[in-house]
Image: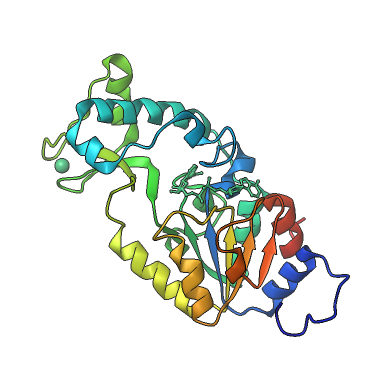
């Protein structure tokens, strides 16, 4: 329990979250798939989530198997049916408001849906640890390839893309697959932000995917307070100053005073 809360029993967890936020000078927000479920994008590990339907395709399989690449694009077409129509929800908007008020310095996200940017968080304050699924890049020359240039021909006869610059067959959404190296610049920025924070709020993540889940622990070990907002318990709850098991949109909206 944070200092000063001893003996106070009538405070709700939302009140405590509001207090932690108001006492903080530099908040870092860390999000997982749970922040986007209220926008209609399923998370991974909840019932009905992505892992109920698909097994992950590892990076090595993508590289070595044309069939794995075809299956990746088939899934992309399927998941785009929700991602492309999703709008930011109250959770995203509450986070954007903490950023615009200068309360929070950055959003570190595991999400690939781009909804933090759509909700108004400036591009340079969103750190995407697992990349972004709204465009593609060539794994050989690094050039950016518009998603529709890939999906258009694939939809017709499952033609696999080739890089328009170098001809490579390794064109992939700009996301980080299991087994793929983490993006260096984003990892470094996430670490800098985490070490500069006095309050770290983990929102909508099961906190089991590493190295991403290492950041909440890093913040805590560095002396920051740690709050976890998630529908169900997480592996890191024992490290937290505050755990709120509740729905993200209403809880965060109330904690940041978003009407
Ligand atoms: P996860 O599915 O493992 O965990 C999500 C957590 O959020 C669960 O514990 C669930 O109980 C909780 N949750 C879901 N909806 C909630 C709500 N409305 N209110 C409160 N809690 C809620 O997701 P994760 O921890 O982000 O797993 C990591 C991986 O998931 C990342 O690699 C990420 O790239 C990927 N992913 C991203 C998206 C996206 O971009 N929206 C979607 C699916 C998966
Ligand atoms: Zn190329």
Q: Is residue 137 above or below residue 82?
A: below
Task: Pinpoint residue 233: horizontal percent, then vertical percent.
Answer: 63, 55
Which residue is found at the position 48% from the left and 79% from the top? 196
Q: Is residue 7 left or right of residue 127?
A: right
Tally the numbered discs.
Answer: 0
Q: Is residue 155 above or below residue 240?
A: above
Of all residues shown, which one is farthest toward the right? 10
> Is 246 situated left or right of 212 in this image?
right
Query: Hey, which residue is sitting farthest left in the picture?
Result: 166
Residue 132's place in the image compared with 203, above or below, is: above
User: On screen, 8 above or below 143?
Assistant: below
- The reply, left or right, for residue 154 in relation to residue 45 is left
Q: Quick check: can you spot residue 166?
A: yes
* Quarter of the N terminus within the rendering: bottom right
Q: Quadrant of the C terminus?
A: bottom right
Q: Quadrant for residue 66, please give it.
A: top left
**Residue 197 horizontal/vertical position (percent):** 52, 77
Query: Residue at position x 88%, y 70% from top?
Result: 10
In this view, the residue in front, 237 or 3, is 237
Query: Image quarter for residue 101?
Result: bottom right
In front here: 34 or 117? 34
Q: Residue furthest top?
A: 157
The answer, for residue 100, to whether it is visible in the render is: no
- The answer to whether 253 appears left or right of 215 in the picture is right
Pinpoint residue 244: horizontal percent, then vertical percent. 70, 60
Percent coordinates x, y for residue 50 in the rendering:
49, 35
Q: How is the image coloured?
A: rainbow
Q: Residue at x 29, y 22 (%)?
A: 154
């Amino acid at each position: 329990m944070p200092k000063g809360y001893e003996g106070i029993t009538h405070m709700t967890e939302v009140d405590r979250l509001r207090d932690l936020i108001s006492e903080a000078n530099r908040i870092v927000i860390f999000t997982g798939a749970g922040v986007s479920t209220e926008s209609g994008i399923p998370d991974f590990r909840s019932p009905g989530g992505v892992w109920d339907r698909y097994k992950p395709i590892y990076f090595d399989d993508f590289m070595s198997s044309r069939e794995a690449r075809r299956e990746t694009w088939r899934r992309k077409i399927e998941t785009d049916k929700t991602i492309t129509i999703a709008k930011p929800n109250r959770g995203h908007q509450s986070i954007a408001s903490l950023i615009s008020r200068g309360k929070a310095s950055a959003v570190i996200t595991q999400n690939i849906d781009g909804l933090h940017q759509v909700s108004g968080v400036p591009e340079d304050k969103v750190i995407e640890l697992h990349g972004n699924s709204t465009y593609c890049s060539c794994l050989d020359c690094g050039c950016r390839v518009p998603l529709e240039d890939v999906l258009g021909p694939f939809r017709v006869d499952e033609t696999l893309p080739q890089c328009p610059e170098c001809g490579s067959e390794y064109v992939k959404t700009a996301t980080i697959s299991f087994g793929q190296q983490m993006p260096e610049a984003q990892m470094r920025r996430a670490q800098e932000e985490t070490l500069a924070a006095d309050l770290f709020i983990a929102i909508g993540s099961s906190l089991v995917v590493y190295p991403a889940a290492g950041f909440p622990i890093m913040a805590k070990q560095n002396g920051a307070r740690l709050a976890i907002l998630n529908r169900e318990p997480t592996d890191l709850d024992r490290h937290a100053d505050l755990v709120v098991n509740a729905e993200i949109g209403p809880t965060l909206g109330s904690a940041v005073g978003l009407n």
